[in-house]
Image: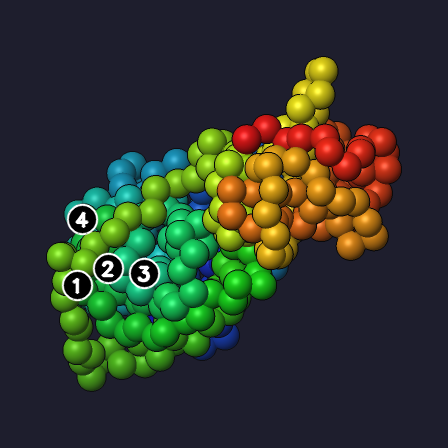
Amino acid sequence: MRVVFLGTPEIAVPTLRALAAAHDVCAVFTQPAARRSRGGKAESSPVGQAAAALGIECHEVESVNAGEPLARMQALKPDVIVVVAFGQLLKRAVLALPRYGCLNFHPSALPKYRGAAPVQRAVLDGVTDSGLTIMRLVKKMDAGPILLQRPWRLDPAKNAQELLAEAGEAGAPMMLEVLSQLEQGITAREQDESQVTFAPPLTKADGELLFSRPATELHNRIRAVQPWPKAEAWLEREPSVRVLVLRAAVEAGSGEPGTIQGISQEGIRVACAEGVLRLLELQLEGKPPRPARDVANGLRLKTGERFRV
């Protein structure tokens, strides 16, 4: 089957590789090169790099909906367009182009969590039972008929970055399964609009940790905002100190929210509105991630000091 692939981040790479091994991927379209590390040069997206390694024609474009990108796509005459986390909405000219339509992998149990950050928002909400979906794209965001859906457990021990990687690996064989059924016909199921929820992109504010909230909620927030924007807490000093919290654990206990109750090799215990959050791995501005005890030693942190609530 002639396939055009649209995708950008790491989650899309396993599907691209699987398609390249089983079908004729005639071209890849991805978002333009960007600076992906502080002080680094502009480099291609993970999908762009994977396409280059596979020797597949690749186009880095602002939009596929008009101009040269659309003309090239039309000239390729694909049987199907496969989309995984591309980052651009497709208009009618693209949606109507392939004879089997445009298929999308979405890491949620649609119609739950339509939008750009389904895994992150589900983790933020404390969801453990989710799903993975292959759907046919329509003009309305993530609203197309479902072709294949599988349950997926969001492991509470994993952060969003780890779960996205897991989803990417699981989605690749699902897409191959759907493609194998297209020629003989595949039954589609319309989404239940009454069950729709949305997953807008994360913002910097989503990473703010306020210890006036329950420890479980803060733990989910820390997991949800990896690798961006990362969770941040402010140590109430003069001047205040910004601390990035990369890993933590929930423990039983109580106390004045934000108060440091203990510092040990096992981490830093901080009282919350409900329970205690043990900070395990931290990062200071311009420094590498370190075990919480090492950061505490560097800051000369003491029991009884407070984080902003």
Q: Which residue is mark 2?
A: 111
- How far apart, in angstroms, are the residues tagged by discs 3 and 4? 13 Å
Query: Residue at point 33% right, 47% down?
Result: 199
- How far apart, in angstroms, are the residues tagged by discs 2 and 4? 15 Å
Q: Which residue is mark 1?
A: 191
Q: Quadrant of the N terminus?
A: bottom left
Report the front residue among 209 and 139. Answer: 209
- How far apart, in angstroms, are the residues tagged by discs 1 and 4? 14 Å
- As drawn, the residue found furthest toward the top would be 238
Q: Which residue is mark 3?
A: 104
Secondary structure beneath dot 3 equals: strand
Q: Which residue is mark 4?
A: 139
Tell me the quarter of the picture where residue 69 sits: top left
Q: Amino acid at mark 2?
A: Pro
Q: Position of residue 186 (x, y in %)?
A: 20, 79
Query: Residue at point 59% right, 37% down?
Result: 256
Query: Residue at point 47% right, 31% down?
Result: 205
Q: Position of residue 274 (x, y in %)?
A: 51, 48
Q: Earlier in the sequence, mark 2 or mark 4?
A: 2
Determine whether label 2 and label 1 are within 8 Å by CB: yes
Q: Position of residue 297 (x, y in %)?
A: 86, 37
User: Label 3: how many residues lie within 10 Å, few (<14), some (14-19) or many (20+)?
Assistant: many
Report the front residue among 7 and 277. Answer: 277
Q: Earlier in the sequence, mark 3 or mark 4?
A: 3
